[in-house]
Image (cartoon, rainbow, N blue to C red):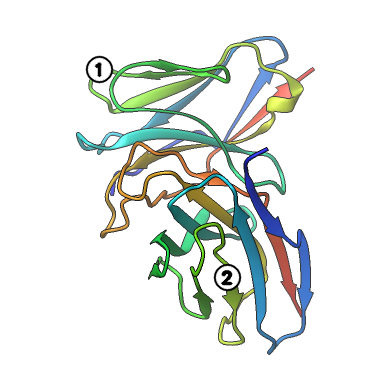
Amino acid sequence: DGGITQSPKYLFRKEGQNVTLSCEQNLNHDAMYWYRQDPGQGLRLIYYSQIVNDFQKGDIAEGYSVSREKKESFPLTVTSAQKNPTAFYLCASSINRGSYNSPLHFGNGTRLTVT
Amino acid sequence: DAKTTQPTSMDCAEGRAANLPCNHSTISGNEYVYWYRQIHSQGPQYIIHGLKNNETNEMASLIITEDRKSSTLILPHATLRDTAVYYCIVRGAHGGATNKLIFGTGTLLAVQP
């Protein structure tokens, strides 16, 4: 089955440590995205990539970094510079990077807890 | 950016149609209306989207008013598994991020047995 796989589902880290969240898709989608969701709130865009080897900052990129070396993979690193890293992280992809008529498909998220 | 307004919560009896309203009075001509839903602790699930005409798929129907200032998502026969937060999103160009989705807080639909 085609889809988006995020791993792990739950992740625990100590404050001051960097952590990398995995996102893989086998949908052959061009564009990939990372969102963050906090309790009772909507999703906020962290980074997005419309093509391999290219990515742009979203609304809340500070303290995060990404890479897009392969079409199917878009890992997100939460660095120690991120002040409030505990959140639910969602990865998404879409078939067409330049169109509004192209739904985003989401993974099932990684819940990161930093203590 | 076009903004959407949805009721915070709604109830629906199992087996009945669920009609979820959304206001988007500042929508512009090239912006699509998207609906997603999110079940607790899962990723959002795409339901349906449209520009001007009414749309139907295996999950739901989308009715968009002629002036495009509001829309209604219809789940024809709600089941307990349809209990979720439903997001209405207007999608267009946002500062160059042409695929950007802006999520509000949505409508919590509770399907009652």
Residue nearest the observer in this picture, B38 or B19: B38
Name the chain under label 1: B
Mark 1: amino acid: Glu
Q: Residue at x 65, y 10 (%)?
A: B16
Q: Quick check: A64 above or below B42?
A: below
Name the chain under label 2: A
Residue nearest the observer in this picture, B76 or B113: B76
Q: Is mark 1 on a helix, strand or loop?
A: loop
Q: Is residue A91 left or right of residue A108?
A: left
Q: What element carries label 2?
A: strand
Q: Residues within 10 Å of mark 1 (few under 14, many from 20)?
A: few
x, y (%) of residue A24? 62, 57
x, y (%) of residue B30? 22, 36
Where is mark 1, residue-wise?
B66
Image quadrant assignment for residue B37? top right
x, y (%) of residue A27? 55, 44
Q: How crowded is mark 2: few (under 14 residues within 10 Å), some or many (20 or more)?
A: many
Q: Which residue is drawn at 34% across and 42% down?
A: B91
Q: How far apart are marks 2 and 1 (CA)?
A: 42 Å
Q: Which residue is drawn at 50% across and 47% down?
A: A28
Q: Quick check: A102 above or below B71?
A: below
Image quadrant assignment for residue A105? top right
Mark 2: amino acid: Leu
